[in-house]
Image (spheres, helix red, strand yellow):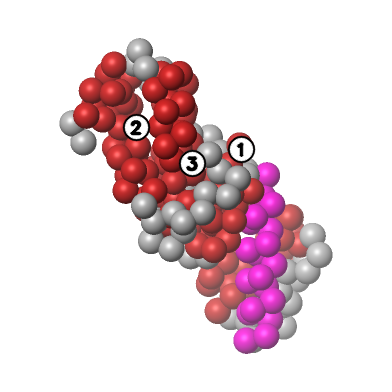
Amino acid sequence: MVAFDKRAKPFRGNNLDLVAPLIEMPCHLEPTRRMEIHDQAAVILRFQNLRGMKAELGGTRSDLSLAADHLRAYLKRLADFDDVEAEEQALAHAIAYPDPLSALHFLTHWPALDRAAQLVHQRFDELDGDRYEILTLAAEALSARYPLAASLALRSMIDFTLNAGKSSRYQHAARHLAEFDALASQIEDFATVEPHNSYVARLKKEHGKKSGFWTWLEEK
């Protein structure tokens, strides 16, 4: 076990790029494999003078998590100035993280909802609408302050369900569209995003024959 070093410095340069993959440890791994990852992390963290995070490495809520709890625990150990600097670097890293849903999960749970909304707007085309467990929670978290970003999260799930013809999810997609209807009245400016009425009209044109979906919508 590597003890926490109070002299450890916050993330610098590419340090976070090296550490992030190690704190994405899937919950289902066997204990032996988890220990191997712990050992690998200890070597890198010692070399990078980030030993404070060693004690925080462990299981995450999701296979696609940037481990917000681990980072938060690490930041609590830093001096105020370093705390702010390290947090800013971590949030900036999340925005550009290769897997946008990992980043969205992290930003939603941090929480840094302004950054989560920014990510949804900037990387909407990369969102996998199949990952409803992340997008549903993100839409709920964003709805009060960032209704346009919340609507995009909902659209991602709706589009995936209808484009893929996932009839087993039509009920959920209908609920998401009903939620989008409610959010639309809160959105003053859609900017470059397709307006709500146009979006619904396009759905009817492209998926009008998916009667199961529209039947569920009528019941909402």
Disc 1 marks a residue whose amino acid type is: Glu
The residue range painted magenta reads: 80-98
Camera-side residue: 210 or 13?
A: 210
Badge 2 amino acid: Ala
The residue that label 3 is drawn on is 195
Q: Residue 201's spot in the image, x, y percent?
A: 42, 28
At a point 41% along the width and 32% down the height, the residue shown is: 200
Percent position of residue 203, x then y? 42, 25
Of labels 3 and 2, the one closer to you: 3
* Residue lying at 39% horizontally and 22% vertically, measured from the top left: 204
Q: In the image, what residue occupies the spot 71% across and 60% down?
A: 16
- List x then y, in percent, for residue 64: 53, 45
Please give the label number shown on residue 173.
2
- Quarter residue 172 falls in: top left
Q: Nearer the viewer, residue 164 or 76?
A: 164
* Image quarter hosting the C terminus: top left
**Is the magenta region chiefly helix, strand or loop?**
helix
Give the image location of residue 140, x and y in percent: 37, 53
Say which element carries label 3: loop
Mark 3 vs mark 2: which is more N-terminal?
A: 2
The answer to whether 182 appears left or right of 21 in the picture is left
Q: Residues within 10 Å of mark 2 (few under 14, many from 20)?
A: many
Circles 3, 2 touching at the beta carbon (< 8 Å): no
Q: Is residue 147 magenta?
A: no
Quadrant of the frame with the N terminus: bottom right
Label ID, residue 126: 1
Residue 218 sits above or below residue 112 on the image: above
